Amino acid sequence: MSARVGGTALSPTRVAAIWGFAEATLWFVVPDVLLSWYALDRSTRGYRASGAAVLGAMVGGVVMWLWGQAGSGAAYGVLDAIPGIQKELIESVRHAVSSEGLSSMVLGGFRGVPYKIYAVAWGELGGNLAAFVVLTVPARAIRFLLVTFIAGAICKGPLKEMTLRRRRMVHVGFWFVFYVGYFVVMG
């Protein structure tokens, strides 16, 4: 999936970096959707894009960390308006970050907790920015790479005989069902 901006094609890695940034700030659809899409026909493209999504998330995370330092009340108000984020989740992350530090962020991505909340909470606490940036790598990369690997393995296994078009239909259906379930559970 390449995108065009002003007549210029964006490479898959650039699209992934932009998506990583967007989801780390205000967008609510995880880069996993894009990364698994790339893995439908070439998992190597998904792996390269995963790295770019992590870099984009780092930049977005720094923006949110800065916002948390400058005015966490306003940041939390905006986060509360994002689908899938409620005040209770924000308070839970604030508590986890203040009691467990950034280790809670690394595990949070596997629990469906948005990274952006950890960034604001760590900024609010005045947490070390360098530590945040370093721990962004495992917090984001492990899941991104795992999703890419699983999508590629499924395409080389059970979906091997399907056309790319049918794989894409399965992909869209999977993520539709995933997000319906996510929003039912997370609100």
Image (tube, rainbow, N blue to C red):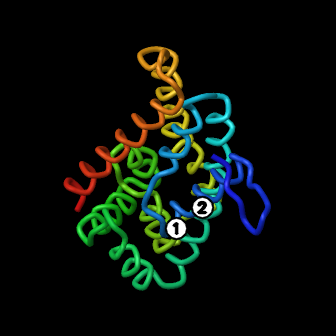
Which amino acid is tagged 2? Phe
Dividing the picture into quarters, in which one does residue 82 lie? bottom left
Q: What residue would you read off at disc 1? A: 25
Question: Mark 1 near mark 2, Cβ–Cβ under 8 Å?
Answer: yes
Q: Identify the residue at image location x=53%, y=33%.
A: 148
Residue 161, compared with residue 42, is above or below; it is above
Residue 92, compared with residue 158, is above or below; it is below
| Residue 21 disc label | 2
For the C terminus, give its image quadrant. bottom left
Which amino acid is tagged 1? Thr
Foreground of the two, 91 or 98: 91
Locate residue 137 relative to residue 104 in the image: left or right. right
| Tally of numbered tags | 2
Task: Rate crowding at label 2 as few (under 14), some (14 to 19) or many (20 or more) other CA atoms within 10 Å.
Answer: many
Residue 108, compared with residue 91, is above or below; it is above
Residue located farthest toward the left when viewing the structure as drawn: 184
Foreground of the two, 140 or 107: 140
Locate residue 187 relative to residue 48 in the image: left or right. left
Where disc 1 sits, the SS reads: helix
Residue 41, compared with residue 131, is above or below; it is above
Residue 152 pos. (x, y %): 53, 25
Where disc 2 sits, the SS reads: helix
How many angstroms separate mark 1 from mark 2 (CA)? 6 Å
Q: Identify the residue at image location x=65%, y=42%.
A: 49
Q: Identify the residue at image location x=55%, y=70%.
A: 65
Locate residue 71 relative to residue 95 in the image: left or right. right
